[in-house]
DNA sequence: GGTTGCGTTGGAAACGTTTCGGACACGGGG
DNA sequence: CCCCGTGTCCGAAACGTTTCCAACGCAACC
């Protein structure tokens, strides 16, 4: 920049003013500066820029788990889009479901002076973020120990929707598969119970399956066990996209066809032998909202108390969730 | 850091030495400094750190298209992992297939003083990167106008593998669907032609379908046209995961079952009514290799001339690619 | 003609680190 | 006793911006 100033025969301050908003500079001078910039191929050094007191870099951080999971990938994509439109870059911190690693990753990002953090939090305590002086928006689930903005999905409503749908088909033994103790898991289970209570049906606790892992493999194994019991469920609610996949694999293996409803839509769900009924929400909007909110916080535009945005879920009927109870146990019934 | 120095009663230089490698400092002094750091909760400011002359930030940039595409997501995930292990963060630039936007995004990232760039390039000229003084690794396809490292897949070999497989089943009319002029597309087509030539079979050019877009929708439409012709192909080679999806949708609509081979594996491929045969490669390794190479370049460890890493493709037979020619036209043939 | 005010410009300070030359203490060798 | 080397430590300079204050020219006004 100093070279530009020399070349244009002006002072540094003037160059800086031109590079930024550029008012308070005579048109003629500004033009000379712009010419010099073009000739020298000057490009502002964002790092030096972010060094000034109080200034933050024009980057947001996004901390989430496995990008290979379309759920996370969608959040990443959509938040990236929104951030990009405002000239913000996004620094990614991927965490493999390891609470300690997450803390380290977050502090790494904070030390990079990002303007804000979007976090899909692991369990664990996040109070260490409270004093960091950086706005934080949690995505998909809240965190403990800190009161910050949160954008999420109506998990309980979704769980209830899925379960009600199955109960309405006449199912009385509806299994639910749950990934390890995420917050979302608990809410979806609550919806499941609520639906049962409303319908006056008692929950068979042995049909509430807490998986050791949130993987398709774990769900597959659990479903096999479930279906080979003497009293198998006639319907299965898989509370996660990966779990749904596992359930379907298991069912193919044992050749059974209980009703199935999944939580979260997934690619090709409608192309499977029996198209899969799911409870879905607008995940992309989840990411967009989070990014928008964070940008407003970072710019100081938004000083409201912490917000809580909840997106609705909708049932998408495709077939697997509309199978009646009696089709499951006996192959050629009816 | 200046506070830490005061608190520990030492000079700045000493604190800096402790924070970094930390030799040339007496153990006792170092301990005092560490104590002060802990008490004050001091955290190094990475931004200021990167400001020093010659220094680059400890971030890599990754520029790619739609993260929603599992192909890109996998690259992102795996390269993130490798970078993270070396203490590097990854700044993401997502580009929506817009050559001008890509250039802007890249310059944005360069201005952030990233230590290196990993780019899945759009067509367009990338010579503007030559003088940037930042190491660049291209991923999945090379770029024009610059001679840099490149990590890619054996596209031609894969295209050939897929086509040979179909020809071996006795197919003589094999259609190929191609996304718009990516480099990869050209190579896959070349493999397709080679396979035909080797087998002494002439290519019907009307079966080489250049799509206007690389989407499932475009492929679906093209496949419909293809199958409703008086002389439809008996086999289809979809040169991209999204294209494969489109092909399958179209086939379901028209109720035909030509043989299908896709390029790149995808989730649930084995769960579809007819499991899908694909030519696949280790995409995660693509990302890992790129990150490793870039880290070596950035650290100055690796000063070899630009490398060209090519990963092999393998055929995964699942059923859709093993259908004989005559099963396609007539529904109940055989 | 002096004063005031405005639009424009110049340049120093500040940001938080790393690095580098030098200072200081201490001990050993001449 | 002096000199020198070694180990430790200090603090100024530098990095490339932004921002703030001062200064300047000019016109309008008193």
Image (cartoon, coloured by chain):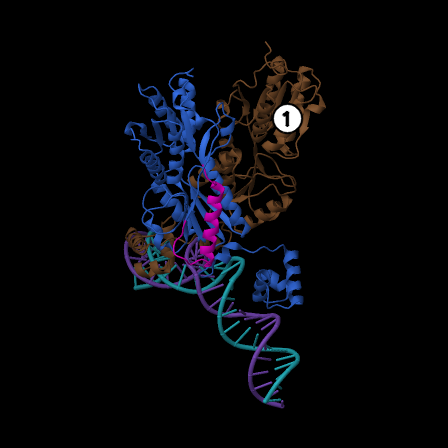
Chain colours: A blue, B brown, C purple, D cyan
**Figure quadrant of the N terminus of chain A:** bottom right
Q: Give me the chain letter of mark 1.
A: B
Give the residue at x 67% y 26%. B225
Q: Is residue A281 above or below residue B28?
A: above
Q: Position of residue A99 (x, y in %)?
A: 34, 41
Relative placement, left or right, of B89 versus B29 is right
* Snapshot quadrant of residue A202: top left
Of the pair A107 and B24, the residue shown nearer to us: A107
Relative placement, left or right, of C4 versus C16 is right
Q: Position of residue A43 (x, y in %)?
A: 58, 55
Q: Position of residue A60 (x, y in %)?
A: 47, 50
Of the pair B30 and A231, the residue shown nearer to us: A231
Q: Is residue A281 magenta?
A: yes
Residue at the top extreme?
Answer: B334
Give the residue at x 32% y 56%. B40
* Snapshot quadrant of residue C24: bottom left
Residues packed near mark 1 inside 10 Å, few (<14), some (14 to 19) or many (20 plus): many
Q: Is residue D2 above or below residue B63?
A: below
Q: Is residue A113 magenta?
A: no
**Which residue, given by chain and number where applicable, does mark 1 sit on?**
B223
Per the rendered image, the range of residues in magenta is: A280-308
Q: Decide if residue A24 is in sight here.
A: yes
Of the pair B181 and C12, the residue shown nearer to us: B181
Q: Position of residue B140 (x, y in %)?
A: 57, 34
Relative placement, left or right, of B320 versus A215 is right
**Figure quadrant of the C terminus of chain A:** top left
Relative placement, left or right, of B224 versus A93 is right
Of the pair A247 and A59, the residue shown nearer to us: A247
Q: Is residue A295 above or below residue B263?
A: below
Q: Is residue B272 above or below residue B95?
A: above
Q: Decide if residue A56 is in sight here.
A: no
Secondary structure beneath label 1: helix
């Amino acid at each position: 920049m100093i070279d530009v100033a020399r070349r244009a025969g002006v002072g540094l301050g003037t160059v800086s003013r031109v590079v930024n908003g550029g008012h308070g500079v005579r048109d003629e001078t500004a033009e000379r500066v712009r010419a010099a910039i073009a000739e020298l191929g000057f490009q502002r050094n964002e790092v030096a820029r972010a060094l000034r007191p109080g200034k933050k870099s024009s980057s947001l951080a996004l901390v989430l788990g496995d990008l290979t999971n379309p759920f996370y990938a969608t959040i990443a994509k959509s938040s990236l889009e929104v951030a990009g439109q405002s000239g913000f870059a996004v620094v990614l911190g991927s965490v493999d479901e390891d609470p300690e690693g997450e803390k380290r990753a977050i502090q790494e990002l904070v030390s990079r002076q990002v303007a804000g953090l979007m976090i899909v939090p692991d369990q664990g305590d996040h109070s260490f973020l409270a004093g960091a002086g950086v706005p934080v928006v949690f995505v998909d689930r809240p965190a403990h120990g800190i009161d910050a903005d949160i954008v999420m999905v109506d998990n309980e409503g979704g769980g209830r929707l899925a379960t009600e749908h199955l109960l309405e088909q006449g199912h009385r033994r509806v299994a639910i598969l749950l990934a390890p103790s995420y917050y979302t898991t608990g809410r979806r289970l609550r919806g499941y119970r609520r639906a049962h209570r409303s319908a006056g049906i008692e929950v068979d606790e042995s049909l509430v399956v807490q998986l050791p892992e949130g993987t398709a493999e774990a769900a597959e194994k659990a479903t096999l066990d479930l279906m080979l019991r003497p009293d198998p469920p006639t319907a299965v609610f898989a509370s996660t996209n990966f779990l749904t996949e596992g359930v379907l694999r298991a069912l193919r293996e044992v050749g059974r066809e209980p009703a199935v409803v999944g939580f979260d839509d997934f690619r090709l769900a409608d192309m499977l032998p029996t198209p899969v009924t799911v409870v879905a929400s607008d995940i992309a909007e989840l990411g967009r909202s989070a990014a928008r909110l964070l940008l407003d916080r970072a710019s100081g535009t938004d000083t409201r108390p912490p917000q809580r945005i909840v997106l609705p879920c909708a049932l998408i009927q495709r077939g697997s969730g509309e199978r009646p109870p009696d089709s499951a146990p006996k192959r050629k019934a009816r």
